[in-house]
Amino acid sequence: MDPISNPYSPGAGTPPPELAGRDDLREQVRVAIERVRRGLQSKSLLMVGLRGVGKTVLLDQMRDDAEAAGIHTLRIEAPESRSLPALLAPQLRQALLRLSRNEQAKDLSQRALRALAGFAKALKIKYHDIEVGLDLDPEPGLADNGDLEHDLQALLETVGAAAQKAGTALVMFIDELQYVEEPELAALITALHRCAQRRVPILLIGAGLPQLRGRMGAAKSYAERMFEFPEIGPLNEPSARLAIVKPASAQGVQISDEAVAQILVESKRYPYFLQEWGKHSWNTAGGSPIVLNDVKRASASAVAALDESFFRVRFDRLTPTEKKYLRAMADLGPGPHRSGDIAVRLNRVVTSLGPTRSQLIAKGMIWSPTHGDTAFTVPLFDEFMCRIMPGDDWQRAG
Ligand SMILES: Nc1ncnc2c1ncn2[C@@H]1O[C@H](COP(=O)(O)OP(=O)(O)OP(=O)(O)O)[C@@H](O)[C@H]1O
Ligand SMILES: [Mg+2]
């Protein structure tokens, strides 16, 4: 069928035509935000899940929901290289400039802008990458100690006070939180803890790979009690079906039950893969309805497309040693695997593989579900590794 009208949208952070199966979580977040706005106790929430399960699009949707309800928001994505203060500062500034337009909150917003100026100046020594326009002079003694843990807490409290005065809340939406360095995570946790204790209307809605939970706990031992960590995973059957059927029927295109069932099996109901199979099935089919045979014929091109984009971008960032490690894991199956078993597969002792394993965790390729276990963060990556490094040549390489 006509690819121009193809509704499916595989991609990173690309909104799906139908955001299926996430209503409960959206509602949970809406309630948490409304409560914090009213000065009631509420927990920040960090969504954890593998690559391509839909964390980013959900985070963006939640942000839109919040903005529509008059909540002030900021949105950042933590890359592997920039510091959290450098990412936060310009976003906080913009939020404060918006808040200062509110007559009631004007004075407190200005005070918060002073806090931001002190914060940026004092921390610039340690975090060189902080760059933010300064609208007002610092207020001596306000968020300007030069110690992130202390200053972030003071800054967020002043920001929260301004938001409170305006009858709103400030919600920080942060994606890829697992890449934030541990001391910066610790400072963020402390600041949020303080805000919660004082009923200051500031909340964090974050997303990250499954290792995020452990990283938060390592940064501050009480973090695991302080936050909700909802797991985002494959869609359940009715939702996966909806994600496929609804976008097509909106265009008057039907899909047979067997065809839908086949897509659900092949994609294992992972959101990214559902979009890819939906897209290729649509393009392959001659017309409505899309039938089983169309899906079967589309599978090869769906897999090829995944190999070229979703999997490939990750593979290309790996060193030869890292590739070999992951290939050995793939040889053992989908996982999780014991570190000892991976070492045996590589004819090495476990300890000598420690550095490679750590690099792979830092890159967000693998994680450790329980001590000594290793799992892929990319669904179906084991099958991809066997396709891209077939045979057993890899055992001799490197
Ligand atoms: N609930 C959903 N229903 C249908 N499709 C979805 C859903 N959530 C996400 N998708 C689709 O899945 C793909 C991946 O989504 P997204 O980029 O948000 O995943 P992610 O978890 O952030 O991945 P990564 O960890 O790689 O950043 C997108 O093409 C998106 O349209
Ligand atoms: Mg994402």
Image (tube, rainbow, N blue to C red):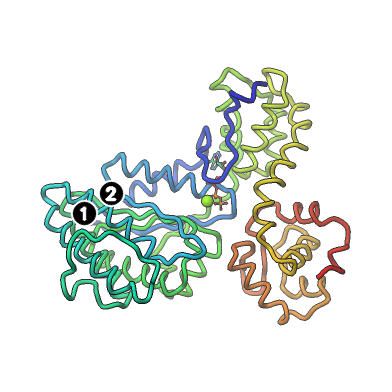
Task: Measure the alpha-carbon separation of dots 2 and 1.
Answer: 8 Å
Three-letter amino acid code at the position of disc 2? His
Residue 146 percent across, percent down from the top left = 29, 77
- Number of other residues with Cα within 10 Å of mark 1, as a class: few under 14, some 14 to 19, many 20 or more: many
Considering depth in this image, is 224 or 10 the residue closer to the camera? Answer: 10
Q: In percent of the image, x 67 and y 38: which residue is there?
A: 264
Three-letter amino acid code at the position of disc 1? Ala
- Which residue is under mark 2? 72
Q: In percent of the image, x 68 and y 42: which residue is there?
A: 267
Q: Is residue 254 above or below residue 71?
A: above
Assign the C terminus to one quadrant of the image. Answer: bottom right
- Which residue is under mark 1? 163
- Number of other residues with Cα within 10 Å of mark 2, as a class: few under 14, some 14 to 19, many 20 or more: many
Q: Secondary structure at mark 2?
A: strand
Side of 89 relative to 96 (left or right): right
Residue 169 percent across, percent down from the top left = 25, 52
Q: Is mark 2 within 8 Å of ligand 2?
A: no
Side of 227 relative to 67 (left or right): right
